[in-house]
Amino acid sequence: MSAWQKQPITAVVTAQELQDQLLALGLRETDSCLVHTSLSQFGYIPGGEQTVVSVLKRVLRQGNLVMPAQTADYSDPSYWEAPAASPAAVQRIRASMPPFDRRLSPTHFIGKTPEYFRTLPGTVRSGHPLYSLCAWGQNSVELCETTTYDLPFGPASPLQKLYALDGKVVMLGTDYASCTVLHLAESTINRPQFTEEAPVWQNDRPVWVPFKNVALEPYDDFNALGARFEQAHPQAVQRITVAPGTITVVAIRPLVDFARDYYRQKDRRHPARLRRE
């Protein structure tokens, strides 16, 4: 029995309460929102991820709902660190790793809600083998169109399209540490590029394909950046407490623009942090 199961339920957030709070934070039915979730922060939500996704769809019924769908464990095991893989294990993993499949490949390490959302009828998934996102709504196909594997969070990514749509980030119980849209800033400030690989289907057979990427989160400081952003742009952030957790809504454009300037300055001071070992 987990520690959570040993505690009595005292905080309950219903679907109607969640919907009311999202509307109070200024979400409109035509908004395009990238949503991150940690439902345990809200005590108990009857229906869990089903309730949360249903509420988000009602609130954004003429807009777009987007969630991460990364499969980072499909990466080259030569670079794994936690845990690392021995040289012999690397060879066996690469030889037997299933190729990425938009429909079948599950999300890993990002929670139950994004995985539930991925499996629903009407959800569209982008085609990057490591760094995909899922979308539902008016522009879901356009958002998930994948024309290149290079710079998966860069100018051709779903994140850039959310920026163009003047989208918002919705953090349900999370903070900036998991704010994926900050990778758009990191990917569009001319950081040195390196090559990654991932398995995909090509001509009916699995192939490890190379693609270009940049250092992501080399400073592990997204929360520090978020604090500075909120101090500089308080009008771009809305937050409300729900039971023990918080819901935060942030405008994407000012956040990404601020992060670009922040990381340009930091990169000039720490160029060695941007190289892949």
Image (cartoon, rainbow, N blue to C red):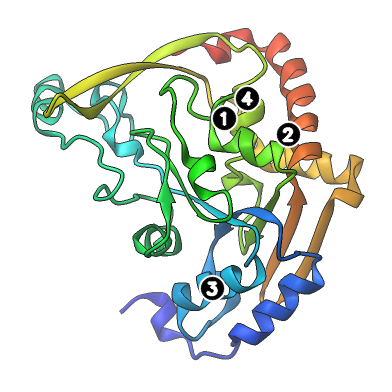
Mark 3 or mark 2, which is nearer the start of the sequence? 3
Q: Amino acid at mark 3?
A: Val
Is 214 or 150 nearer to us in this picture?
A: 150
Q: Residue at x 82, y 60 (%)?
A: 238
Distance between the alpha carbons at the discs numbered 2 and 3: 26 Å
In the picture of the structure, the residue carrying the numbered disc 3 is: 52
Q: Is residue 17 above or below residue 2?
A: below
Q: Is residue 122 above or below residue 103?
A: below
**In the rendered image, which quarter is residue 25 located in?**
bottom right
In the picture of the structure, the residue carrying the numbered disc 2 is: 256
Q: x, y (%) of residue 90?
A: 16, 24
Distance between the alpha carbons at the discs numbered 3 and 1: 28 Å
SS for callout 4: helix
Q: x, y (%) of residue 188?
A: 64, 20
Badge 1: few (under 14), some or many (20 or more) residues near its Cα, within 10 Å? some
SS for callout 1: loop
For discs 3 and 1, the disc positioned in front in the rendered view: 3
**In the rendered image, which quarter is residue 164 located in?**
top right
Q: Which mark is residue 175?
A: none
Q: Amino acid at mark 2?
A: Val
In the picture of the structure, the residue carrying the numbered disc 4 is: 186
Mark 1 or mark 3, which is nearer the start of the sequence? 3
In the picture of the structure, the residue carrying the numbered disc 1 is: 217
